[in-house]
Amino acid sequence: MKKTVLLLTMTMILAGCAGKPQPPSWQPNAKSALDGFLDAWLHGDTPAADAEFARARRETASTGRFDKVAQAELVRCAAQVASLVYACPGYAALAPDASAAQQAYAAYLQGQWQGLNAGLLPEQHRAVVTSGTLAGVQDPLARLVAAGALLKAGRIAPADIANAVDTASGQGWRRPLLAWLGVQEQRARAAGDAAAVEQIRRRMALASES
């Protein structure tokens, strides 16, 4: 009797799995590769990040759709902007064929906010354009991306620079932490605060340990 019940249960489970359509393999493969890219990039492992992104690009390119590849490129652009790297040649080559929302997000990342339709942006970034602050951006990576966009737009406040440093530090993300500490160092040096400059440099040296 128990064997019969077990057999029926397994048959029902398998039938349920068989009845649920599976996503095409490129989708989970691309997501896995992009997740791997983000982890490696934020932790400062450039070779691993490059390898993972190349895999994500191959998976999305297999669809022959510009928007899918452009989306992957925008993920890379956003991660780079979080670390204050603004060149995005991979996306630029696809920009004419990108969607309106993708074009708006790319402009946002580059600090090109004049005439920008904020309604086309991902929800957590819309208020950044109107308020000029990081207030309300809860996701750590999105907060760093927004901070990078604010800096590029010339609208970032000292408190949000400190917020970016604390966010990167709290996540253990070495690359953006070093980038934002560099911003703090530049500002301290411009202000003539030698003690702050020295303290920031010691912190950068510590974060750079392998």
Image (cartoon, rainbow, N blue to C red):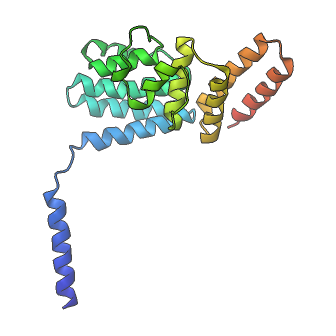
Q: Residue at x 26, y 20 (%)?
A: 99
Q: Quadrant of the C terminus?
A: top right
**Rendering coords of residue 198 (x, y %):** 83, 23
**Residue that extends furthest to the front in the rendered view of this protein:** 131
**Rendering coords of residue 136 (x, y %):** 52, 33
Could you tell me if residue 41 is visible in this image?
no
Q: Is residue 64 above or below residue 4?
A: above
Q: Residue at x 65, y 37 (%)?
A: 169
**Rendering coords of residue 188 (x, y %):** 77, 17
Q: Quadrant of the N terminus?
A: bottom left
**Residue that extends furthest to the right in the rendered view of this protein:** 195
**Residue that extends furthest to the bottom in the rendered view of this protein:** 1
State which quadrant residue 118 falls in: top left
From the viewer's perspective, tell me whether residue 59 is left or right of residue 32: left
**Rendering coords of residue 205 (x, y %):** 75, 30
Could you tell me if residue 119 is visible in this image?
yes
Q: Residue at x 83, y 12 (%)?
A: 192
From the viewer's perspective, tell me whether residue 1 is left or right of residue 142: left
From the viewer's perspective, tell me whether residue 84 is left or right of residue 1: right
**Residue that extends furthest to the top in the rendered view of this protein:** 114
State which quadrant residue 37 falls in: top left
Q: How many numbered markers are drawn?
A: 0
Q: Residue at x 38, y 29 (%)?
A: 122
